[in-house]
Every structure is written in C-alpha cells, then in structure tokens.
Amino acid sequence: MPHSRRGEGDRKDARGGVLRRLGEWCARHFVVVIIAWLVALVALQVVSREFGGEYSDNFSLPQAQAQKGLDVLKAHDPQAGGYSSQIVMRDDQQPLTALSSQMSTTVADLEKLPHVLSAQNPLTAPGTPSGQQNVGPLSDDKKTAYITVRFNVQPSTLGDDYLNGVDTAVQPLRSAGAQVEYGGPLGELARPSADDRVSELIGFGVAVIVLLVGFGSVIAAVVPLLSALISVVGGLAILGLLAAAFTFATVSPTLATMIGLGVGIDYALFMLTRHRQNLIDGMDPVRAAGQAASTSGHAVLVSGCTVIIALAGLSASGVSFISLLGVAAAVTVVSAVVGALTLVPALLGLIGRHIDRFHVRTPIAETEAGAGDTPQGTWHRYAQRVERRPLSFLSAGVAVIVVLAIPLFSIQLGHIGDGADPTSFTDRRAFDLMADAFGPGSNGPLTVVIDQTNVPQSQRSDLASKAQQSVDKVQGAAVVTPLTPTQDGDLLIGTVYSTVSPQNATTTDLTNRLVDDTLPDVVQGTDAKGYVTGTTATQVDFRDIVASQLPVIIAVVVGLAFLIILAVFRGLLVAVKAAVLNVLSIAASYGVVVAVFQWGWGGPALGVHGKVPIESYVPMMMFAIVFGLSMDYEIFLLSRVHEAWLRTGDAKGSVAHALEITARVITCAALIMVSVFAAFLLSNNIVVKMLGLGLAVSVLIDATVVRLLMVPAVMTLLGRHAWWMPRWLDRVLPHIDAEGSKAEARPAS
C-alpha cells in the first residue's frame, strides 16, 4: 500500500508540475502570452470572415418515414416534391380577384427565381371541394389567398440576398395595396438576424456588480470578464471555420456564446481566487500564479473535460443536428479552459501585487478569517448548523426540488410554431392570416403519399378507393383532399389538414395515427407503401426520434459523469450522490420551463404568444449542458472536502471547512452564470429563451438548493462512509487528481 500511495503521489507531482510550470511561465512571460493571444484572435477573425461557413437549419433525417416519403415524391413528381413555402396576401379594400394581372405577374416572376420548381396561382388553382371547410388557396370572401412556392432546396438556407428577388416579384401586389407576408421557411429567412449584444452586455454588467460586491477588488472583477470575452471570441471564430465543413444550426453561435461566457468567467474566477489567497499567504506573483494553475487549474481541467464529455454524450442521439449543437458548445468550453490556464496567469503576472490596488471595499480572500486562523465566518457557522441538523436541511432541499419538478410530469415535446413568434415577424403575420381565413390546420398540411409502383394495375382502383375511405375517416382531420395519382400513375397524393395548429398535440396524434394505423391498414395485403410527409410530419418524426433517444442520452451522460467523479474522489457513495442530486436539480429546472412556456405561467411576459410545447431537443441539450456545468461546482466543492478529509480524517469537519472556503466563490460564480443565461431571455428566438431560462434556473437551483442544502447534509450523514471504495474498483479505475496537490495518506478506518 505505501508503494502504491508513493506511485500515486509521483503521478500527481508530475501532473501538478506541468500545470505549475505552465502557469509560472505564462505569468513570467506575460507580454509574450498576451500578444500571442491577441495576434491569434485577430488572425482567427480574419480567416473566419474569409473562409468561414454559414449557419443553417438545413438537416435531414434519412431514416425517418417523412424523408422517405419526400424522396419518393421527388422521384415521381419533381414539381410536387421539394420544399414548400407560402406567400400570403390580404386586401381589406377589394377582392384579390381584382388584382388578377398583378397576381399573374408575381407568380411568373417567382417561377423565374433560382431554385424554384413551381409557384401556384391562387386565382386559377382548384379550390376546396364544396361542403368542406375552405383551406385555400383563396378565401370565401376573396380577400385572403396564398401562393405555394416549391423549391429544390430548403428556402431558409438560401441567404438574405435571395429575399431581394422575392421582394421584387411580389412588388406589383404590394403596389396595388395588398398586404404580403412570407410564411414557413421563407418567413424564417426574412426574420431579423439574431443580435445577442444586449444580452451579453447585461450579463457582463451583472457579473461586474457581483464580483465587486463579492470580492471588493476592481481589477479582480475585470480579469475574469476580459479573459472570458477573449476566449469566447476566439472560440466563435473557430466555430465559424468549422461551419464551412459542417452544417451547424442557426442557434449554434448563441448557444456557444452562452456556455462559453458562463464557464469562461467561472474558470477564471476559480483561478483568480486561489491566486489571491496565495498572495495573501506570502507567495510572489509568479509562484502564486503557478500554484493556482497547479491546484485550481487542475480542477478547471477536470471540470472542462467533464462538460465536454457531457456534451459529447449528445452524439448518442444519432441525430447530426443535435450532435453538432454539442460540438458548437464544446468549442467555446475548450477555448475557455485554454484561456483560464494560459491567459489568466499571464494577466495575473502583468498585474503583479496590484490586484487589490483599486477596490470598492476591503477585498476578501477565500475565507473570512486571516491566514492561519481558524475559519469562523458566516459560511462556517452555516455549515455547523447543517452539521447539527442534516436531516432537516436535506428534507427542505428535497421539498423544494419536488415542488418545482411537478410540472415535468405533464411535459409535451413538440415544435414551436410561427404562431408563438412576435407580431413583428412576417412569418407570424402570415400564420395569423392563414389561421383566420383557412383554419389553424392550414399552417401545417400533411401530405399523404401512397407508393403503388409494385401494385398491379388491376388492383390500383380498389387500393385508391380503400385509401380514400380510410383517410377520410381519420380522427382529428378537418379536411382531406381527394387522393389523386401522379402523372406516371405510380403514386397517390392527398393532403390532410388538422383541426388545430401544427404545434398542438392533436396534430402530432393525427400524424402518428396516419403513420402507425391508417396507412398500414390501407396497404396491408399489397406491395404498396404509405408515407406522411411535409414540414409538420418531419417535425413530428424529429420529436419522436429525440424523445426515444432522451433516456439513452441521460444514461450515457450520467454514467460518464459518475465514472469521472468516482475516478477523481475515490468514493463510491460520493459518486452516487453527485449523480442523483444533479438529476434531481435538472428535473426541477425542467418543471420550471414547462410551467413558464407550456402552462403559460409568465410566457407572455417573456414575449411568447400563448402556450407552446417544449421544443423537442431542448430537454436533451439542457441535460447535457447542465449536468456538465453542475459538475463544475461539484468538483470544486468536493475537491476541498476531499483535501481536508485526507489531511484531517474528520469527515464532518471537512464538509464545514470546504463550504467555508468555497461558498463565496461558488455563489458568485453561480450568480454570474445565472445572469449570463437569463440575459438571453431578451432574444427573439423562443428556443433561445427556453434554453436561457432552463440553464439559469438549473444553475441557480444547483448552486443554492443542491450545493448549500443537500450536498452538505448528505455528506454529513454519510460521514467517512462517503469515501468507501471497493479495492478491486480502486485498482481498475484511473487516478485523477482534481486539485493537483500531493495528498497526505488517508486516515486509517
């Protein structure tokens, strides 16, 4: 055992030595490091602008039935296939039939645009059969109509310049006094570009206030913000270069900014706090920076790897769209870690001993006691209260989590439709015009495709009759158009309109009913195949795939995080506790998101029109991100508990000691991260609002209820048993040192 302990110590010395030497070198050669960072930043910006790619929501689900149906449709009728979008017109002064010449000119000009397969004139197109609800393309009062434009590519990927041609084509109608709005993908293309500068400024402003109040030093408040900003800007430039090779979603840079700023400020703050304590303890600035890199730098490295591993777990979804969102966030996490380990020591070397020269109050170190004194500050007294009544504190924490998690049991995954957007968006105005004139289901038509290529001619008539009767009777449909054969006769095509909007759960049920029951019954006993395609059907397929993979993602992320905690702290019950409590805190944040957006408790105040489902991939993204971030605080707190436990053998006292020296920095770091995330509630993108609220609430719950109530209570109740580790497992797992310091021998049991 002594030989094993000595070998472990040698490994820790080697690892700690690398980071210590790196930190000291950066602090000593701060001019070189800072100039290198600035040159790299400028070079990355130039290269990214020149060779970087565009962000796009153009992705496909090759194995989804909606995509297969679209492929079949394209093969047999290219004009009917492709991607459709609506241009909606409304004229309150005169019927649109009075604008026949302008309509013909507009349709002709639209058909001349690149990538357009066809454009349907609503004044000459066949209308809805009599006796059925009018679903267009011309309303009963002749004052609302829509042109269906079909493209050979996803319109939302064509770039802003493409809209100039569309605007020119519809100008005759606008000049005649008609209101013209773009729906669907064209409307998404016309949305104003995301501008998150206000959110970033608010997040930075709150961070400055928190740091000044928490630590008193002006320079100490600036360093984490400056290093985080530089790291994120560099990371976003790298992401832009990656976008030239991979298709990243339009929300990717916003997500990367949110995560990058949050962890960047946190990591720099943890480094800075340890550095200031080292200065107070009498070290010179270079050595203090090296020691901070050797200790807190190790925790930053382990925490960053944990976040990246959690994000990498998103690849288990099997959906490239979601996997690449994880990659986007991981890019800025990597840049934040590199910035904390190199740029922060360089800035600390530049500042030297003047870190507290400018202050708004007496600067404080990690504890409220002087160096060498017994900690007796506020947090230590609080920890002693937890130690005396652990069950009461644990019960209070569990009660809060349970109450907040209640809405989770009614969660409805889906896609947020255009009807939830601000009225300043053209796609929202088009959505409202369509719903008012043709019913809510007109915004999400379902295209039914029956492939009868392998069905003998003698059986096709019976198949068409049976299909029409079955589809006509499907529950939840407001209108079903006749199933008509394509020109080659190999496909039957019809459209089903729901009684409610596309984002409603009833439309999802209608789609699944057609796919799982109606069409399989129709083609049973034949060689025909049935599909339901279109934008709404694709969204339902995406939702179902994501929902089925969510348990896999949870299992992968929890499992990986469990192994990391186990390898770092060598305590089986500690690792179990970390996994369970983090899952509970995420469940509570899910509940808050459901209450606000799905139940509508505060949604309108956030700029959300009505009640909306939870975007299908948001819970998956939240879980990976929050689980990784919560491990940051877990590692920083437990590393101090573990360090004290190895030194003193006092399990309960170690918890109080760790809480005393980490509570202030963890609280400040959490408040900063909450403010950064919450500031993105100002975004016009509802998914960004949802992620911002979910991440802010998760961090808030994790840093307060979990970290201040439940973790100290559980650790106190477990006592020395928290650090029990089976010998065989101890031999199998790699040894990872969170704080990089050579630990003393563990006390005898």
Image (spheres, helix red, strand yellow):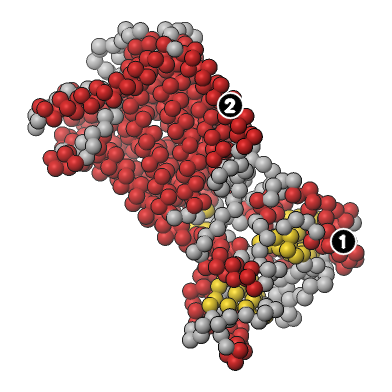
Mark with earlier residue (1, 2): 2
User: Crowdedness of circle 2 by 10 Å Cα count: few (<14), some, many (20+)?
Assistant: some
Q: Give residue 746's quadrant in the image.
A: top left
Q: Position of residue 543 (x, y in %)?
A: 50, 59
Report crowding for label 1: few under 14, some 14 to 19, many 20 or more residues within 10 A (C-alpha). some
- Circle 1 or circle 2, nearest the eye: 2
Residue 117 lies, in percent from the top left, at 73, 63
Disc 2: which residue: 43
Left or right relative to 236: residue 398: left
Q: Quadrant of residue 51?
A: top right
The quarter of the rendered structure image containing the C terminus is top left
- Give, as a three-letter code, the residue at label 1: Thr
In the visual, does 697 lie left or right of 252? Answer: left
Tell me what residue is drawn at x 74 percent, y 60 percent: 116
Give the structural element (helix, strand or loop) at label 2: helix
Residue 204 image position (x, y, % from top left):
54, 27
The numbered disc on residue 105 is: 1
Q: Mark 1 near mark 2, Cβ–Cβ under 8 Å?
A: no
